[in-house]
Image (spheres, grey):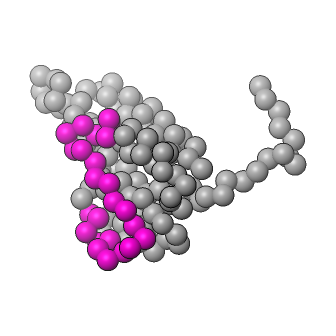
Amino acid sequence: MEITNGAAITKSKKAKIIIYSKPGNGKTTVAGLLPGKTLVLDIDGTSQVLEGYENVDVAKIDGENPHDSILQFYALAKANIAKYDNIFVDNLTHYQKLWLLKKGENTKSGMPELKDYALLDNHLLKVVETFNSLD
Protein backbone atom coordinates (compact mmCIF):
# COMPACT_ATOMS: atom_id res chain seq x y z
CA MET A 1 0.00 0.00 0.00
CA GLU A 2 1.34 3.36 -1.03
CA ILE A 3 0.99 6.40 1.23
CA THR A 4 1.10 9.89 -0.29
CA ASN A 5 1.27 13.13 1.65
CA GLY A 6 -1.51 15.56 0.73
CA ALA A 7 1.03 18.22 -0.29
CA ALA A 8 2.33 15.86 -2.99
CA ILE A 9 -1.09 15.13 -4.50
CA THR A 10 -1.88 16.98 -7.71
CA LYS A 11 -5.20 17.38 -9.48
CA SER A 12 -5.65 16.33 -13.07
CA LYS A 13 -5.37 19.23 -15.48
CA LYS A 14 -8.27 17.85 -17.50
CA ALA A 15 -11.89 17.42 -16.48
CA LYS A 16 -13.30 13.90 -16.35
CA ILE A 17 -17.02 14.01 -17.04
CA ILE A 18 -19.73 11.40 -17.59
CA ILE A 19 -22.99 12.74 -19.03
CA TYR A 20 -26.14 10.66 -18.54
CA SER A 21 -29.37 11.81 -20.14
CA LYS A 22 -32.30 10.76 -22.29
CA PRO A 23 -31.77 10.53 -26.06
CA GLY A 24 -32.12 13.88 -27.80
CA ASN A 25 -31.18 16.02 -24.80
CA GLY A 26 -27.93 17.29 -26.34
CA LYS A 27 -25.19 15.02 -25.02
CA THR A 28 -23.41 14.92 -28.39
CA THR A 29 -23.80 18.67 -28.88
CA VAL A 30 -21.91 19.22 -25.61
CA ALA A 31 -18.78 17.87 -27.34
CA GLY A 32 -18.79 20.86 -29.69
CA LEU A 33 -19.37 23.33 -26.87
CA LEU A 34 -16.44 22.25 -24.71
CA PRO A 35 -13.54 24.71 -24.58
CA GLY A 36 -10.48 23.67 -26.57
CA LYS A 37 -10.00 20.83 -29.06
CA THR A 38 -12.13 17.69 -28.66
CA LEU A 39 -11.68 14.14 -29.98
CA VAL A 40 -15.00 12.30 -30.16
CA LEU A 41 -15.64 8.57 -30.51
CA ASP A 42 -19.01 8.35 -32.29
CA ILE A 43 -20.56 5.07 -31.19
CA ASP A 44 -24.22 5.77 -31.87
CA GLY A 45 -23.95 7.62 -35.20
CA THR A 46 -25.11 10.99 -33.90
CA SER A 47 -22.00 13.01 -34.74
CA GLN A 48 -23.79 14.81 -37.59
CA VAL A 49 -24.96 17.35 -34.97
CA LEU A 50 -21.30 18.41 -34.74
CA GLU A 51 -21.33 19.69 -38.32
CA GLY A 52 -19.39 22.94 -38.54
CA TYR A 53 -17.53 22.60 -35.24
CA GLU A 54 -13.89 23.16 -36.20
CA ASN A 55 -12.74 22.32 -32.67
CA VAL A 56 -13.98 18.71 -32.97
CA ASP A 57 -12.44 15.63 -34.61
CA VAL A 58 -14.64 12.54 -34.86
CA ALA A 59 -13.60 8.89 -34.97
CA LYS A 60 -16.31 6.30 -35.68
CA ILE A 61 -16.53 2.94 -33.95
CA ASP A 62 -16.48 -0.27 -35.95
CA GLY A 63 -19.86 -1.71 -34.97
CA GLU A 64 -18.78 -5.17 -36.12
CA ASN A 65 -15.93 -5.16 -33.62
CA PRO A 66 -16.81 -2.76 -30.79
CA HIS A 67 -14.39 -4.19 -28.21
CA ASP A 68 -11.28 -3.85 -30.38
CA SER A 69 -12.53 -0.56 -31.78
CA ILE A 70 -12.79 1.13 -28.38
CA LEU A 71 -9.29 -0.12 -27.53
CA GLN A 72 -8.01 1.34 -30.81
CA PHE A 73 -9.67 4.65 -29.96
CA TYR A 74 -8.00 4.67 -26.55
CA ALA A 75 -4.61 4.06 -28.22
CA LEU A 76 -5.34 6.89 -30.67
CA ALA A 77 -6.38 9.23 -27.86
CA LYS A 78 -3.33 8.34 -25.78
CA ALA A 79 -0.92 8.82 -28.69
CA ASN A 80 -2.46 12.20 -29.51
CA ILE A 81 -3.34 13.44 -26.03
CA ALA A 82 -1.20 16.57 -26.42
CA LYS A 83 -3.37 17.66 -29.38
CA TYR A 84 -6.67 17.47 -27.48
CA ASP A 85 -8.15 19.17 -24.45
CA ASN A 86 -11.10 16.76 -24.32
CA ILE A 87 -11.73 13.11 -25.13
CA PHE A 88 -15.44 12.41 -25.61
CA VAL A 89 -16.93 8.90 -25.86
CA ASP A 90 -20.46 9.09 -27.29
CA ASN A 91 -22.10 7.01 -25.93
CA LEU A 92 -21.52 4.12 -23.55
CA THR A 93 -25.15 2.96 -23.59
CA HIS A 94 -24.94 2.22 -27.32
CA TYR A 95 -21.52 0.63 -26.82
CA GLN A 96 -23.08 -1.75 -24.27
CA LYS A 97 -25.69 -2.79 -26.82
CA LEU A 98 -23.11 -3.37 -29.56
CA TRP A 99 -20.89 -5.34 -27.18
CA LEU A 100 -23.75 -7.60 -26.04
CA LEU A 101 -24.99 -8.03 -29.61
CA LYS A 102 -21.53 -9.27 -30.59
CA LYS A 103 -21.51 -11.72 -27.65
CA GLY A 104 -24.91 -13.02 -28.73
CA GLU A 105 -23.56 -13.93 -32.16
CA ASN A 106 -21.60 -16.75 -30.51
CA THR A 107 -24.63 -18.42 -28.89
CA LYS A 108 -27.24 -20.83 -30.25
CA SER A 109 -30.09 -18.44 -29.43
CA GLY A 110 -28.35 -15.40 -30.85
CA MET A 111 -28.82 -13.68 -27.49
CA PRO A 112 -26.13 -12.86 -24.93
CA GLU A 113 -25.85 -15.26 -22.01
CA LEU A 114 -26.27 -14.27 -18.36
CA LYS A 115 -22.50 -14.40 -17.80
CA ASP A 116 -22.03 -11.83 -20.58
CA TYR A 117 -23.81 -9.18 -18.51
CA ALA A 118 -21.35 -9.71 -15.63
CA LEU A 119 -18.45 -9.59 -18.09
CA LEU A 120 -19.87 -6.36 -19.52
CA ASP A 121 -20.03 -4.75 -16.06
CA ASN A 122 -16.37 -5.58 -15.48
CA HIS A 123 -15.40 -4.45 -18.97
CA LEU A 124 -17.19 -1.09 -18.66
CA LEU A 125 -15.54 -0.44 -15.32
CA LYS A 126 -12.15 -1.05 -16.93
CA VAL A 127 -13.03 1.14 -19.93
CA VAL A 128 -14.02 4.06 -17.69
CA GLU A 129 -10.92 3.64 -15.50
CA THR A 130 -8.68 3.42 -18.56
CA PHE A 131 -10.05 6.60 -20.14
CA ASN A 132 -9.93 8.31 -16.74
CA SER A 133 -6.16 7.70 -16.69
CA LEU A 134 -5.64 9.84 -19.82
CA ASP A 135 -3.97 13.13 -18.90
Q: Is residue 122 left or right of residue 26?
A: right
Quarter of the image holding residue 26?
A: bottom left
Q: Nearer the viewer, residue 72 or 130?
A: 72
Q: Is residue 103 left or right of residue 6?
A: left
Q: Quadrant of residue 47?
A: bottom left
Compared to residue 122, the image places residue 94 above or below, namely below
Give the percent coordinates (x, y) of residue 62.
Answer: 24, 44
User: In the image, what residue occupies the spot 47% across and 56% down?
Assistant: 87
**Magenta span includes 56:** yes
Residue 51, x across and y down, in percent: 29, 74
Is residue 84 left or right of 31 when viewed as pictured? Answer: right
> Is residue 41 in view?
yes
Q: For the magenta stretch, what is the residue range?
A: 46-69
Q: Residue 2 versus residue 134: which sits nearer the camera?
A: 134
The answer to which of 48 and 124 lies nearer the viewer is 48
Query: Was residue 87 drawn as part of the magenta stretch in this picture?
Result: no
Residue at the image point whose x is 83% and y is 33% from the top: 3
| Residue 13, image x, y percentages | 66, 58
User: In what quadrant of the picture does the N terminus appear?
Assistant: top right
The residue most toward the bottom is: 52
Residue 2 image point, x, y percent: 79, 29
**How many numbered circles does the render carry?**
0
Q: Nearer the viewer, residue 119 or 77?
A: 77
Q: Residue at x 39, y 29 (%)?
A: 118
Look at the image and tell me whether residue 25 can be seen: no
Q: Residue at x 19, y 39 (%)?
A: 64
